[in-house]
Image (tube, grey):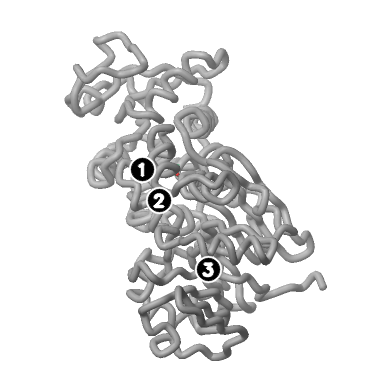
């Protein structure tokens, strides 16, 4: 596509779609224009006004337009997103997508389609909004040195926790505000139950370590059971509670992944990542830590990332998935010990979890709390405990590999 201008068929005109339309209209050197926008209802009132002839409800108006040389897919529904993206790739049309749920579920097939039909799918906007984490992992960190990628990958939960933790606001009011501001998913349980962060982590892991791990295999717990007692506990320890996703090498030939609230100490970079911001810490051999910070949710921050992927197509950029071809890739494991804080009242947490080691146990009339070490595999087996609303878990981080000390 080099030197040719980009003619875009856009699917979806919600918060991010409208952001892309506006951002593209204000970008002087974009060499890209939106030719057609496919939406479910062309008459729906929208904040951003566009010429009526740009809108269509028929996907064929885009797929049958020979001038369109890039599909930008920003629909809310994962099934519809899959149909659009796979159809475009099969036609050899490159695609930019922000649909993390769809990408995280179908990435191996989407990689195959890109190779088979010699075309590209770019999705930096799917992970961490405006932070260019995927392209950096793919290009700059194209080596064996990565030890860990960890961070706050969900803007909505971080916004809610900041409002509750730092401003003493009510959880439900903060969630409602996150929805109003366009940070939360249309079904906000994806955010608060940790799945949005998990989908981003799965995509990040493909580009960090060259391994695809299906969602079902990753221990994931969100923030919905957080209680004043947990906030109080964290404050007393000089920490904050954040929803953290991480992929980490645990030895030379294994890595692990999980998503759960974490007691984040003041000394950590992500301690100061508040509101809808995301923060990603990349740790590697020889360079210790690097930190990327930026807005992780919202129409314009995400649109800026989509714009970057659109511009990358001007230079025929595509992901090469080089790490997936490495001979010596680490294997995924949940056979590791993690240290956790668990607060509970009626559920028999000690009886069901059988901790390897208990460091602290506090029993009171209102609630109990354990700090202990436990295999991640056991947490996975007993995952349903964390659906009980009297149980809240937070990770207390420990290093797996530390070659700098
Ligand atoms: N709901 C997502 C978030 C949007 O809150 O981070 C950006 O992916």
Q: Which residue is at the far right?
A: 405
Q: Position of residue 306 (x, y in %)?
A: 47, 32
Q: Which numbered circle lies on residue 246?
A: none
Measured Cα–Cα span from mark 2 to mark 1: 7 Å
Disc 2 + disc 1, Cβ < 8 Å? yes
Q: Respond yes or no on whether mark 2 lies under 8 Å from ligand 1.
A: yes
Q: Classify mark 2: helix, strand or loop.
A: helix
Q: CA distance from mark 2 to mark 3?
A: 17 Å
Front position in the image: 104 or 76: 76
Mark 1: C-beta under 8 Å from nearest atom of ligand 1: yes
Please state the horizontal and vertical placement of residue 46, each as a whole percent of the image: 30, 19
Task: Answer whether labels 2 and 3 touch (C-beta < 8 Å).
Answer: no
- Would residue 120 be visible to someone looking at this image? no
Mark 2 is surrounded, within 10 Å at the Cα level, by few (under 14), some (14 to 19) or many (20 or more) other residues, namely many
Foreground pick, 237 / 122: 237
Q: Sequence-wise, which precedes: disc 2 or disc 3?
A: 2
Instruction: Give the structural element (helix, strand or loop) at label 3.
Output: strand
On the image, which quarter does residue 94 sit in?
Answer: top left
When the figure is inspected, residue 25 is found, relative to residue 63, above or below; the finding is above
Q: Quadrant of ligand 1?
A: top left
| Residue 405 in view in this figure | yes
Residue located beneath label 2 in the image: 191
- Identify the residue shown where x is 61% and y is 52%: 280
Residue drawn at x 38%, y 70% is: 390
Label 3 and label 1: CA atoms lie apart by 23 Å
**Residue tagged 1:** 185
Viewer-nearest of discs 3 and 1: 3
User: Disc 3 marks which residue?
Assistant: 394
């Amino acid at each position: 596509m080099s030197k040719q201008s980009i003619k875009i068929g856009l699917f979806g005109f919600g918060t991010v779609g409208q952001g892309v339309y506006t951002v593209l209209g204000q970008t002087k050197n974009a060499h890209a224009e939106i030719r057609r926008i496919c939406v479910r209802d062309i008459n729906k009132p929208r904040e951003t006004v566009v010429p009526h002839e740009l809108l269509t409800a028929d996907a064929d108006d885009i797929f049958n337009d020979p001038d369109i040389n890039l599909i930008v897919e920003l629909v809310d529904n994962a099934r519809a997103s899959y149909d659009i993206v796979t159809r475009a790739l099969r036609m050899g049309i490159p695609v930019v997508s922000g649909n993390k749920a769809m990408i995280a579920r179908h990435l191996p097939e989407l990689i195959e389609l890109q190779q088979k039909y010699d075309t590209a799918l770019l999705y930096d906007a799917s992970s961490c909004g405006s932070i260019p984490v995927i392209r950096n992992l793919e290009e700059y960190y194209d080596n064996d040195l990565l030890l860990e990628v960890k961070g706050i990958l969900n803007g909505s939960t971080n916004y809610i926790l900041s409002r509750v933790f730092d401003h003493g606001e009510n959880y439900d009011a903060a969630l409602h505000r996150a929805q109003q501001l366009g940070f939360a998913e249309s079904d906000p349980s994806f955010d608060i139950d940790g799945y949005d962060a998990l989908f981003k982590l799965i995509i990040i892991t493909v580009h960090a370590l060259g391994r695809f791990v299906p969602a079902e295999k990753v221990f994931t717990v969100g923030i919905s059971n957080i209680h004043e007692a947990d906030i109080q506990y964290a404050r007393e320890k000089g920490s904050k509670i954040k929803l953290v996703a991480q992929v980490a090498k645990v030895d030379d030939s294994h890595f692990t992944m999980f998503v759960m609230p974490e007691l984040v100490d003041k000394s950590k970079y992500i301690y100061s990542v508040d509101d809808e911001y995301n923060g990603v810490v990349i740790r590697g051999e020889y360079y210790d830590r690097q930190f990327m910070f930026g807005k992780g949710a919202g129409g314009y921050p995400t649109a800026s990332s989509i714009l970057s992927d659109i511009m990358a197509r001007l230079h025929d950029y595509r992901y090469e998935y080089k790490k997936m071809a490495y001979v010596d890739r680490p294997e995924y494991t949940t056979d590791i010990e993690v240290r956790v804080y668990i607060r509970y009242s009626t559920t028999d947490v000690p009886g069901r979890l059988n901790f390897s080691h208990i460091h602290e146990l506090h029993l009171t009339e209102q609630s109990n709390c354990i700090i202990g070490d436990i295999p991640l595999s056991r947490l996975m087996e007993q995952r349903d405990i964390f659906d009980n609303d009297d149980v809240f878990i937070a990770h207390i981080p420990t290093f797996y590999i530390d070659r700098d000390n």
